[in-house]
Each structure stands twice: as C-alpha cells, then as structure tokens.
Image (cartoon, rainbow, N blue to C red):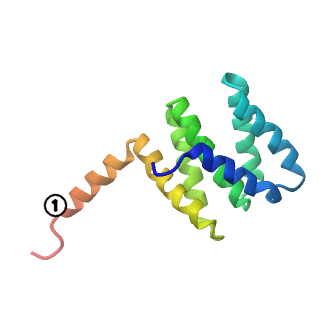
Amino acid sequence: MRFDPALAAQDAFREAQGELGPDWETAVELEQAFSSTTGTEARGAYERLLALAHRYPNARSFQAFCIYITWQQATEETIARHFETGLALCETYLVSQKAGDPLHTERITELRASFRTGLGLQEEDEMLIDYQNDTPKGGD
C-alpha cells in the first residue's frame, strides 16, 4: 500500500467535521473510543461509527474515514466480515454520483483491490480473464 490508512483516517476525520452537523460530537466521542481502546469497546465504537455513516451517505470525508478504519479492523481481526464490509463501503463510495476528493478516491480504489484480494476475489478475476482469453469468439 502506498499510504498509511491510519494517517489517512485521521485526515479524513478532520475533513468530516462539517459533514455531520449535530452528530459531530458523537462522532468525536466514538472516534476517541475507537482509537484509544481495544477489544469489545473499540469494536462497539467502530460499529457505531459505521451506523453513523449510514445516516450520512453524502458525507464523503466521513465515508472515506470509515473505509480507512475498516481496513484497520481487517488487519487487526482478519475475518471475512471486515473485508466484505470494506469492499461494500469502497464500492458505494466509488459509484456515488458526487465525486470525492481525488486523493481519497485514489486511496479507496487501492483499498478496494486489497479488500477483494483478502476475500480471494482477485484470483477469481484472473481465472475469469484466462477463461475469456481461452474461449473461442464466435464464428465456425
């Protein structure tokens, strides 16, 4: 990876301040709990941050923040659910009608590939390409 997701998360979180309106204070408390604790408390804060993100689908910086912290979750607890969540968040971010910050978009595109690889989807893509290349194309 060509960037540090933890530092990117901090930057995105600062940028998100104006996006959450009255829920900003809640986001700050949850982010502090997520960043300064471990185990069940950190996981709970993470889940609540994701729930907050669902309430603000147009909060581009906050969405980016959630993608970055999901990568942190996936590296700390390597389970399919984190990779699936990360992939879904990335795809939602990247197909959104509103263009995000170009730097976040580039990083999220890179993370999307990493989430796919973590789920073994890169291998499926390569096999499909090989299959398509080996399959005769029309004609007699």
Residue 122 x/y as whole percent: 35, 49
Q: What residue sits 57% from the left and 38% below the top? A: 72
Which residue is denoted by mark 1 in the rendering? 134
Q: Is residue 83 above or below residue 14?
A: above
Residue at the extreme bottom = 139
Residue 127 x/y as whole percent: 26, 51
Q: Quadrant of residue 101?
A: bottom right
Residue 113 x/y as whole percent: 44, 52
Closer to us: 62 or 54:
62
Q: Is residue 21 above or below residue 38?
A: below
Q: What residue sits 70% from the left and 29% below the top? A: 42
Q: What residue sits 23% from the left and 62% below the top? A: 132
Residue 28 x/y as whole percent: 81, 43
Label 1 element class:
helix
Left or right of 125: which side holds 82? right
Query: Is residue 32 at all visible to an observer of this figure?
Result: yes
Q: Is residue 31 above or below residue 12?
A: above
Residue at the extreme left = 140
